Amino acid sequence: MKQVRIGGQAVLEGIMMKGPESYSLAVRKPDGEVAVEVTPYRSLCERKGLQRVPILRGIINFIESLYIGIKTLMHSSEYFEDEEETPAGKAGKSGTAPEKKLRSEKTEEEKAKEEKENKGYMIGTLLVSLIFAIGLFVLLPSFLGGLLLKLTDQQWVANLSEGILRLLIFLAYVAIISRVEEIKRTFMYHGAEHKAINCLEAGDDLTPENVLKHTRFHKRCGTSFVFIVMIISIIVFMFVHTEIMWLRLLSRILLIPVIAGLSYEVLQYAGRHENACSRIMSAPGLWVQRLTTKEPDLSMAEVAIWAVEQVIDVREYLECVRNNSFE
């Protein structure tokens, strides 16, 4: 078995896990049952042989992660809009395995209808999310930093101030939304996701009790990625000098893919190595995860396990970890 590194995301009352050939969505419904769906998916990098191209693979991974993340987050909310039970994709309170419903099992007519109904809403949500994020975390700090140029002719002062302001806005935003009750529970599922992955990578059996024993922090977390993006943006923007406001703002937008690609490489290095350099790279992101992850309960750990088991052969993976026998 080849060594693979799965990753995931917390959604509304559940978890999305992405493996090498599919991603799963496990959601705890209001009646206590668990709904699980599996969607076959291979990254464009793997299909086109781009996984060895630095920077570009990070840009593609960022776009794909954003797409899958928003898609599964929206889909998880559907379980709370319509609580009518269906025969597939659920587990009873007795603990029996939920029936997996692969997207490939749906008829072409069902697929076409589903895609037609969701595509427009998905695109609209994605665009609104991007506009909000770019406006709040990119353009606003850049605009305020540009105003400093009227007080000082030192570009580095304005650019450094912009970067510090961006970090403060991000931390304040996370601190504010963490007070919302629904977000608190999502952060608990975020912690369960990390604990399940840490349990798997440590070679421990995936039981709820074992999962809860592990740390809720993980080097490859999306929170760490965002924080690394903030740091890399400070470094990159320090070399972009312009006093024209519209050009300053445009340069920030155009450099987003480059910064995302560079940040991906840093995150991957930190996640694959255990040395002083990787620990320094990981430290800020792990600290911020204290805000974006919370300690989960036993039921959340169970949901995380269901999500993991749908995208990887857990038994074979654990044997390879324990025997150090990956290809």
Image: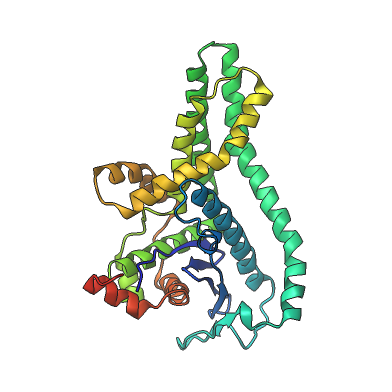
Q: Nearer the viewer, residue 209 or 150?
A: 150
Q: In the rendered image, which quarter contains the C terminus?
A: bottom left
Image colouring: rainbow
In the displayed structure, does residue 313 sit left or right of residue 40? left
In the displayed structure, does residue 256 sit left or right of residue 289? right
Q: Nearer the viewer, residue 177 or 52?
A: 52
Where is residue 182 drawn, in percent x and y? 56, 59
Q: Is residue 98 visible?
A: yes
Measured along the vertical axis of the image, is residue 82 above or below residue 216? below
In the displayed structure, does residue 151 sit left or right of residue 295? right
Measured along the vertical axis of the image, is residue 66 above or below residue 234? below
Residue at left 33%, top 79%? 316
Q: How many marks?
A: 0
Where is residue 249 drawn, in percent x and y? 64, 29
Q: Nearer the viewer, residue 256 or 51?
A: 51
Q: In the rendered image, which quarter contains the N terminus?
A: bottom left
Measured along the vertical axis of the image, is residue 22 above or below residue 223? below
Q: Is residue 206 visible?
A: no
Where is residue 142 drawn, in percent x and y? 59, 28
Where is residue 160 drawn, in percent x and y? 47, 24
Residue at left 51%, top 28%? 237
> Farthest residue in the left direction?
323
> Farthest residue in the front direction?
49
Residue at left 30%, top 46%? 278
Residue at left 51%, top 39%? 259
